[in-house]
Image (spheres, rainbow, N blue to C red):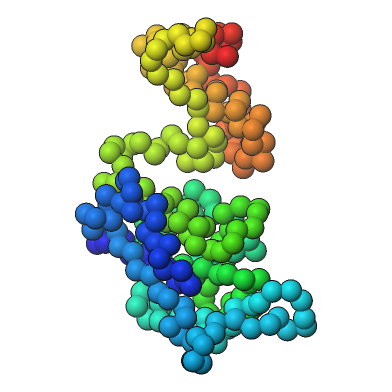
Amino acid sequence: MTWAATVLTLYPDMFPGPLGHSLAGRALQEGTWSLETVQIRDFATDRHRSVDDTPAGGGAGMVMRADVLARAVDHALERAPAAPLLVMSPRGAPLTQALVRDLAAGPGVSILCGRFEGMDERLFEARPIVPVSIGDYILSGGETAAIVLLDACVRLLPGVMGQPSSGEEESFETGLLEYPHYTRPYEWEGRRIPEVLRSGDHAKIAAWRKARAIEDTRLRRPDLIARHGDARRPPPSGARREDEGEDR
C-alpha cells in the first residue's frame, strides 16, 4: 500500500522541492509514497481569500484563523481519516527517530503548515492535531519543517534505501550518535584509518564502533546519555582506543 502524505499549506509550490530528488524522489516516481498539497486559501470564504486576522489582545503580526484552518483540516481528515494529523510548530514536542519510525510504519501523515505569528489556539482544542517541532528555533513557516519530517519518514519505507540494514546503526536509532566512518585512502594528510577497522575482526570492530558511539554522544549530546541505558555501562571488551593517535 502506498504511504500517503498530505500537506496543508499556503505555498503548495514548495513541494515536492527536495523531496523530488534522490531516494525520496525516486520513491515518489515509483509510487512507493504519494504527496498531495492542499491550498489553505481555498477554504477562505471572502473575496480576498483571507486566512489571517489581527491577534486578540493586540500585538505584532497576524494570526491564522481557526474557522478557515478547520475547514482545511476537515478536508484532510475526510480524505485520510487513518493518517495522523500533525502541525509543524516550535511549541510542539520534539521530532524523534522513534516518532519517525512510528509514522513510517503507518498509512501516511497529514501535515498542517503555519505562517505568520501562529494559529488560533481554539483550532487545537477542537481538532485532533498533534504539534511537532524539529528544533528550538524559528522558521518562516512550517513548510521547511514538513519537508524535514517527510524526508525522515520516506527513507524508512520498504525498498527506499538500497539495503534494509542501512539505517539500523544510524544516529538516534539506538539512542546514540552514530560511530565515525572512514574510507580510502588509508592515509590522508597524515591521518590514518584506525587499525581496528582494517583488522578483519568483526567482534573487535563492532566493539570499537559501540565505544566510539558512546564516547561521541557523551561529548556532543550528553542529553541523550540519560535516555540510553547502555551508554552508562563500561565499553565492550576490546573497544578501547588502541589507535588513539591515528584517527585524529
Left/right of residue 120 with respect to residue 210 in the rendered view: right
Q: Residue furthest front?
A: 48
Q: Residue at x 37, y 81 (%)?
A: 78
- Position of residue 60 relative to residue 19, above or below, is below
Left/right of residue 134 with respect to residue 18 in the rendered view: right
Q: Residue at x 65, y 54 (%)?
A: 137
Left/right of residue 14 with respect to residue 248 in the rendered view: left
- Quarter of the image for the N terminus: give it: bottom left
Q: Residue furthest left?
A: 30
Q: Position of residue 231 (x, y in %)?
A: 60, 31
The answer to whether residue 141 is visible is yes
- The front one of 122 and 128 is 122
Image-quadrant location for residue 42: bottom left
Q: Position of residue 106 (x, y in %)?
A: 37, 61
Image-quadrant location for residue 150: bottom left
- Position of residue 82 relative to residue 209, above or below, is below
Q: Position of residue 145 (x, y in %)?
A: 52, 57
How many numbered marks, from 0 up? 0
Q: Residue at x 41, y 68 (%)?
A: 12
Image-quadrant location for residue 117: bottom right
Q: Residue at x 37, y 53 (%)?
A: 19
- The front one of 246 and 60 is 60
- The front one of 188 and 99 is 188
- The front one of 29 and 77 is 29
Q: Position of residue 50 (x, y in %)?
A: 54, 85
- Position of residue 194 relative to residue 82, above or below, is above
- Quarter of the image for the C terminus: give it: top right
The answer to whether residue 101 is visible is no
